[in-house]
Structure formats: C-alpha cells, structure tokens
Amino acid sequence: MSFQKLIKTNLLLFIVIIVLEILFAAGSATSSYIIQFAYNQLVKNILLVFLLIIASSVFLSFLSYILSSLATYLFSKQTQKYIHSIRHKLISKYYHDKAPKVAEMENELNSNLQVLTKNYADQSLSIIQSGFLLVTSISSLLLMNWMLTLLAIILSVITLYIPRFTRQKASNATQKVVSRNSKYLLAIEEWFNGLEELRKYTAFNKLDLVMQKVSQNLETSFVKRKKVISVADFLNGCANSFSQIAITLLAAILFFNHQVTFGVIIAAGNFSSMILNCLLTITTSLTRIQSVQGLNKQIIESQKLASSHKETNTDEIYSISTHNLSISFKNGETIYFPDIHIERGEKVLLSGDSGTGKSTLFKLILNKLQPTNGQVIFENKYGKEVSPDYAEIGYIPQDGKLFPTSIINNIIMFDNKLKKLVKKAVENNDLSKDIASMPNGLETEIDLDTNNFSGGQKQKIILADEATSAIDSKSSYRILKNLVSSNKTVIVVAHNLTPAIEKLFSRKISLVNNKR
C-alpha cells in the first residue's frame, strides 16, 4: 500500500478531505481559544457574555466534528477504492504468474488487506487530522504567550521520538501474526478438504489436535503483538500526561506573574489536552504504521507481475521431448522419467500404474512444476528450441474445476464468441442426453454446495485428466474417437482402457514405477 497511490486514486476527493480537515482543525482551535474570553468575563461577573461565548464555543466544536466525520467517511470511500485496485492487481498476478496456495491467496486478499486498511490507511488519516489540529493548537498558544508555544514544541518533538523504541518489535510481531494466520488458513484448506475421509475413519482426535496446535500458535502471536502495542501505548501515554501537566503548570506560573489572564490558564489547559491528544494519536498511529511495514512491502511486491515483460514465442510447436527428466519431493522421493519424443499431430496414450508419475509428467510439460534435473524441450519445424505460450496448450486435469454458473458458461469459459461451437462440443462429448434431462438445459446453474451433477456429468463437461474414469465405456469410446479425429497433438492419461479404445491412438507410452 502506497500513500501516494492512495491519494492518486481520486486526487480531487483527497483535496476535499484535506480542506475539511483544515476546517475541522481551525474550528476546534477557535472553539478552545475563545474559552479564555468567556472565563475572563466570568471573573468580572458578566454572566450573559460568558454564556454567549460558551454557546459559540460549543457550536463551533459541534460543527468541526461534523466536518471531521464527513472527511473520515470520504477517506474511507477512497481507501476502499484503492483496496479494490490492489485486489485487482493481486488477482491479475495470481492469474498470469504462478499462484500460491488458495489459503495464502485468501490471506492476502482478505486478512492482510484488512490489517493494512486498519493499521496503515486509517492511521494515515489520523496523522493528517491530528497534524492539522496540532499546528492550529500551537499557533493559538503563540497568540497567548510565546513561552507556552516553545514548551509545547519541545514536548512535541520529544513525544514524537518515542515510537522509535518499539518500531522493530511491533513490525516483527505483526509479521508473525500474518505468517501464522496464513498457516492457520492453510491447515484449514489441507485438512478440511479431506473431511469425509476423516469422518470415515473416525479421526476427529487427529483433526482436533492439528487445528488446536495451529490455532494456539495464531492466538499466541496475537497476544504477543498486543503486548508490544500495549507497551508502546503506555510509553506514549506517560509522555503525553507529563507534557499536559507541564503546559498547564507553566500557564499557572505565568498567571501568578501577571503575564497572562485567568482565562489563559483554562484555555492553555484545553490546548495542552488537545496537543497531547494529538501527539498521542500521532505516536500511536506511527507505531501502527511501522508495525505493518514488512507486510506492506510484501503486498507491494505481490502486485508486481513477474511475467509482464515476457515475450510470447509465435513459432508453432512441432515436437515435445524430455531428456533425463526427474523430480524430487520434500519427503525424499524422486521420480525418474524415460526420455520421450512426441511429434506434432500424434495421438499418444500415456499409461502406467498409480504413482508412476503420469499427472506429474503433464505438470512438468506445462511448467506447473519445475524438474529437479533434466528438461522438457519444445522445438519448431526447423528443430530449433522455442519457448511455448503455455496458455495455448490445452490441459484438462483429473480434478478439473467447475464454476458456480451455467453449464454453457463452464463450456465456453465466459467467451461468448465460442457459443456457436457449443452444440457440436455437447454432441462430441456425449452430453446431449444429460442436457435434455435438465430443467433449463444449457442454462442450468451448477451448484457446488448441493453438488447437483454426477461425476460422469462433470467429466463430460470438463473432460478431465484420466478423462473417462467416471464415464461409461460406450461414452468413453465416442468422446475419445472425436478427440483423436482432430489434427491436434493429443496426449491422454488413462489406464484399464478397452482394446478398442487403445486402437484409437497412434502409440502407447507406458510409465513404470521408477522411484528412488
């Protein structure tokens, strides 16, 4: 989050906010300044003038806070507009670059931005508001007596220096909260995705143990951050209390030396309270802002597109090959793949037992995983190695996703230009009978909560990796026959296929268990 970019979100609106805050500060200072005249009249027993000045002071104060509330509302609108633009950039980053896990994305798009809104944007407005009020209050003291002003300035400088003592600890504590919140969300994603399996094997105790551990870690980080913030607030409060007493005491000394009137003591007391409240707000806000510096840098970096300047290679791919390809996992397991070479237009069946790395090989080819050793090579018709546009390579995973919208939108993936091809796609994927049985046909909404489609129906829509695993053999044959009849290069991962289906392919590559 950049304050400069926050301003530029709507410069005119920000100018209006600044004007409102200036008027608020001027009105509040004037309200406190005229109090001295009221009490001077009270000393002279002129009650009516005293009441009129007090009423004027109350009215100015009331009007000032209305202006301040309006400025806060407008600033909130501007902040949310800026937050919306940050979310847009983050989503664009996730889409175009390698996205983190869902839990991490949720944490960035929601929790982290809420933390920044509360501890950066809102605190910035507090500093602006208190800054203007501080200037008008010190200026008002100058009109009363220069010594009061000098003391207020010295105390202000000392008080504003205090947040430096807790800055680093506050920042580290906030980073710890962010990190553990991300781990908590990740645990929810990883364990609750398998909730049915846990129920099946009555493994509640294990689930409860895991969730209690990550929850306790998160709670501990919240408590430690609150402790650091509380220490900072205590130091700020002590400094402000001392400063307020010092200004009021000086005003009293000046009164007894006949250098100021009695009303000045009262007004100086009010101004000292205002000045020290402003300083307390500023120091507290600075502590909050400094506490999220690390998180703010993280969000700024997360908005940058790593692939924004990459050139797309327009050469057509004529072959895919792998050489000495292997990948190692955190558990120490390594999968080694045979060298393969697939020419343009070939229809290849990739088979092998479970765990031999069929889907992993697909992900390596698509650059979704990085190999530990070896390489995947794409060549053009001249045998020259080229860098592919991976978005042009169609890949349908086994756990392909459907979106909570109509069937037709899931088929065309929100590109209305493809609507004219839907009828043929439905027929080719043996989906016509299923569509006809649905109340709204292609406009039938997919409900992810009630799961209103069978596994076979879903795979007919998505054509998943191991595409025919949930579809009957007759439909599988028709779908795969249509698929291999095109001039595209087709690689299908499957096992336990009938001989008739296997004959549809140019050749078969069998992976064996080659783990070490």
Image (cartoon, grey):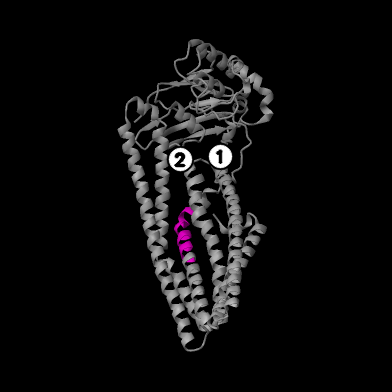
> What secondary structure is the stretch in magenta mostly built from?
helix
Span colored in magenta: 282-295
Percent of width and height locating residue 263: 53, 80
Residue 289 is one of the magenta-drawn residues: yes
Residue type indicated by callout 1: Tyr
Question: Viewer-proximal residue, 261 or 480?
Answer: 261
- Crowding around mark 2 (Cα neighbors within 10 Å: few <14, some 14 to 19, many 20+) is some
Q: Mark 2 = which residue?
A: 103
Q: Position of residue 100 (x, y in %)?
A: 48, 41
Note whether 261 is above or below 132 in the view shown: below
Residue that badge 1 annotates: 95
Residue lying furthest bottom in this view?
A: 257
Residue 61 located left or right of residue 107 = right
Q: Residue at x 60, y 77 (%)?
A: 49
Q: Mark 2: which secondary structure?
A: helix
The Cα atoms of the two marked residues, 2 and 1, are separated by: 15 Å
Which sits earlier in the primary sequence, circle 2 or circle 1? 1
* Residue 87: in magenta span: no
Q: Quadrant of residue 319?
A: top right
User: Which quadrant does the N terminus fall into?
Assistant: bottom right
Q: On screen, 49 above or below 280?
A: below
Q: Depth-wise, is mark 2 or mark 1 nearer the camera?
A: 2
Q: Is residue 21 visible?
A: no
Residue 208: x and y in percent read 33, 36
Q: Amino acid at mark 2?
A: Ala
Query: Would residue 188 be visible to someone looking at this image?
Result: yes
Q: Residue at x 51, y 45 (%)?
A: 109
Residue at image coords 48%, 33%: 364
Instruction: Give the secondary structure at mark 1.
Output: helix
Please provide percent x and percent y for residue 227.
36, 58
